[in-house]
Image (cartoon, rainbow, N blue to C red):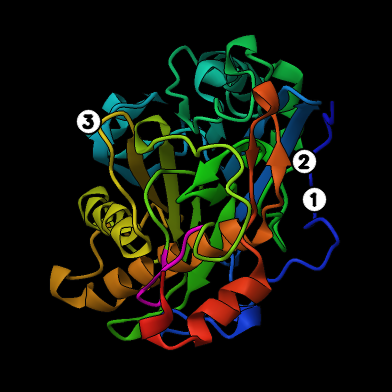
Amino acid sequence: MDPLPHRQPAPGTRRRARDLGIVIGHTPAGPLDAITDVPGVRVGHTSVRRHPDVHSGVTAVVPDGVGPGTPLPAAVFTGNGYGKLIGTTQLTELGALETPVLLTSTLSAFRVADALVGWMLGRPGCEETQSLNPVVGECNDGFLSDIRSQPVGEEHVRAALDGASGGPVAEGCVGAGCGTVALGFKAGIGTASRTPGLGDRRCTVGVFQANFGGTLRVLGRTVTPRSLGLAPGDPAPVAETGSCMIVVATDAPLDARRLSRVARRAVFALARTGAAYGHGSGDYAIAFGTRPDAGAAVADAELGPLFEAVLDAVEEAVLNSLLAATTTTGFRGRTVPALPADLLLDALAAPATDRR
């Protein structure tokens, strides 16, 4: 088991989409091309591994200063509601985020929510708190991990929260992404950012996502393990068993209603990558702003560049999650291949008539 938070990306030769020359859209990325480009947003991971059967963990997206007395404007959009997103009703009703956003394995979501509450109650300013709305989303890792063992505990949650930091974000098989699968390949955590112009100012939007089902499309090309000549291995989980959680952060001055429009675009963006939106897949986006006192400063008619930035950033985050992941053999001996960068580039360079 690895109970320690990942403060920096793990060393290795895995390359991100931009390193391969795959650039989505025209809006500039932030310096790190990560959700932590949004000022005041930190990320922490705790990976929980017990080989061969447990590949799980928890990931925390932590906005500075968030709490029941200092909520941030936020919204949620449900693409398909077959999922376990704790805290969604109050998030929808009040448009206010009171805690960090945590992602974890499906059947561990409830104990993670309890641990998040305990962590929050111990924070400065929460000494008199009697009501609190934890926000925890699930990423189904049951194909590669023994999901029924509920391996994520309070100590893992606290490690992710206490270890959350700015700077580069670890991607791929870390935290909540340890056992996740997407689009036929091993997936995990992915992130990206954009800095669109918004009226007379420039803002930053960052995204963060995990797994879901479907068939991968990259720059309009369909890419599967078979088309890349990879050994078939075990059948991939069907789209019904995916769960995708997208977290969008921005320093744009948006209220909850406008953030709900941003969250919708994040879910729409999954279609670009080949998402199946299956009956049993929980597909959600949470969007929050880091400026609680500037809610209505942007007109709806000015949001176009921000919408486009979110669409592009989510698409890139999906690719980054796949490129950062590594081939994993897990529960019941199942194996899911990683997406090899060299084979992907070969497939994208081949004439369209050569596609299989």
Judge whether 140 appears above or below 226 on screen.
above
Pick the front one: 309 or 24: 24
Quadrant of res 157: top right
Residue range highlighted in magenta: 217-224
Q: Secondary structure at mark 3?
A: helix
In this rendering, would 120 be left or right of 1?
Answer: left
Question: Which amino acid type is marked by label 2?
Answer: Gly
Q: Which residue is mark 2?
A: 163
- Label ID, residue 238: none
Residue 220 on the magenta span: yes
Question: Which amino acid type is marked by label 1?
Answer: Arg
- Label ID, residue 93: 3
Q: Position of residue 203 (x, y in %)?
A: 43, 74
Question: Which amino acid type is marked by label 3?
Answer: Glu
Q: Residues within 10 Å of mark 3 (few under 14, many from 20)?
A: few
Judge whether 77 appears above or below 272 on screen.
above
Q: Which residue is mark 1?
A: 7
Tags 2 and 1 in contact by the CB under 8 Å rule?
A: yes
Q: Residues within 10 Å of mark 1 (few under 14, many from 20)?
A: some
In this rendering, would 1 be left or right of 38?
Answer: right
Nearer the observer: mark 2 or 1; the answer is: 1
At x 46%, y 55%, the residue is 290
At x 52%, y 40%, the residue is 66
